[in-house]
Amino acid sequence: MPNEVPVGHIVQGDVLEVLPQWPENSVDLVFADPPFNIRYQYDKYRDDLAPQEYLEWTERWLDQCLRVLKATGTLWVAIGDEYAAEIRIMMRARATLRNWVIWRYTFGQCCKGKFNRGHAHLFYFVKDPKHFTFNADAIRVPSDRQLKYDDLRANPTGKLPDDVWTFSRVCGTFKERVGWHPCQMPVALLARIILACSKPGEIVLDPFAGSGTTLLAAARLGRKWTGVELSEQYAANALERVKVEGAQPWQAAQPPPVIRKWKKRLGPRRKGRPRNAKPAKDLLAPSEEDIGPAATGT
């Protein structure tokens, strides 16, 4: 059994064969975006298991992720509607749920006989409900009080995001799209999770590395990273992507412009109460302390 986690590498192999070889309590943050069992076309994995077989497989890899996760660590799981409820129940006795986040995506799927699906589920678990990492100030965003109403009651540092997140899917025409993997999450979404739930220099694991987005975001934010991927081709391409793009500095998305012109105010501002709110653009850019030094693999 290895004495340490293979930081800076994507291990090619089956997650149920690779993770049991890793030491316990060795990674700080796990983000898992497994196959959803909806007949996606991967080059190696068969995404059409019988429901019970899929749930048994899911239970096994979740247990391995929890085994390698530190006592103070955090586990995020992305999943679709088909198995979200089962995973929530499955994890009830294993970890503490802090949030059930809905990722509302634009450019959703186009359905013909039912309402279009425009969301996925993001489960946020911790092992110890009293001891975990949550960097609130690293992920604050401008509030409506700041952006729309110019309200003196606004928290000058912004607010924490709600539990419904809006990020566009990475469509085929997007510059971010890699093209060689059938599904890809936006870097900005992973950056929010990594900034919130890990510290610079800590180890981030993606047990289904896929297109490498989790590991890329970790590298750009000064975290150590490691992954597991079944496909030889996906693993090679993802590693190359992380090595090339991971060295680029992180740039947060620009916020919408601040709206200050209103026909009528509710009343004059009180004298002697200076407005200390930060510019909205500063609230979406993490500090150097949040990002940390560039992470390099071993």
Image (cartoon, rainbow, N blue to C red):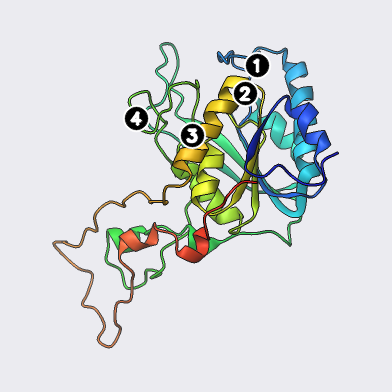
Q: Nearer the viewer, residue 149 or 52?
A: 52
As measured in the structure, the alpha-carbon distance from the residue carrying label 3 to the one carrying label 4 is 16 Å
Frontmost of labels 3 and 1 is 3
- Residue 35 is labelled as 2
Give the labeled residue for mark 3.
Answer: 241
Give residue 11's quadrant in the image.
Answer: top right
Q: Position of residue 198 (x, y in %)?
A: 61, 55
Of the numbered discs 2 and 1, the one sitting upstream in the chain is: 2
- Which amino acid lies under the numbered mark 1 shown in the image of this protein? Tyr
Q: Position of residue 190 (x, y in %)?
A: 51, 43
Q: Dot 3 lies on which element?
A: helix
Determine crowd level at label 3: few under 14, some 14-19, many 20+ residues with C-alpha closer than 10 A.
some
- Residue 94 is labelled as none
Of the numbered discs 3 and 2, the one sitting upstream in the chain is: 2
Q: Dot 4 lies on which element?
A: loop
Of the numbered discs 3 and 4, the one sitting upstream in the chain is: 4
Determine crowd level at label 2: few under 14, some 14-19, many 20+ residues with C-alpha closer than 10 A.
many
Q: Position of residue 271 (x, y in %)?
A: 25, 86
Frontmost of labels 4 and 2 is 4
Frontmost of labels 2 and 1 is 1
Give the labeled residue for mark 4.
Answer: 174
- Residue 225 lies left or right of residue 267; in this view the side is right
Of the numbered discs 4 and 1, the one sitting upstream in the chain is: 1
- Which amino acid lies under the numbered mark 2 shown in the image of this protein? Pro
Q: Nearer the viewer, residue 128 or 21?
A: 21
As measured in the structure, the alpha-carbon distance from the residue carrying label 4 to the one carrying label 1 is 26 Å
As measured in the structure, the alpha-carbon distance from the residue carrying label 2 to the one carrying label 1 is 8 Å
- Residue 45 is labelled as 1
Q: Position of residue 161 (x, y in %)?
A: 47, 53
Above or below, 248 against 143 in this view is above
Frontmost of labels 3 and 4 is 3
Of the numbered discs 3 and 1, the one sitting upstream in the chain is: 1
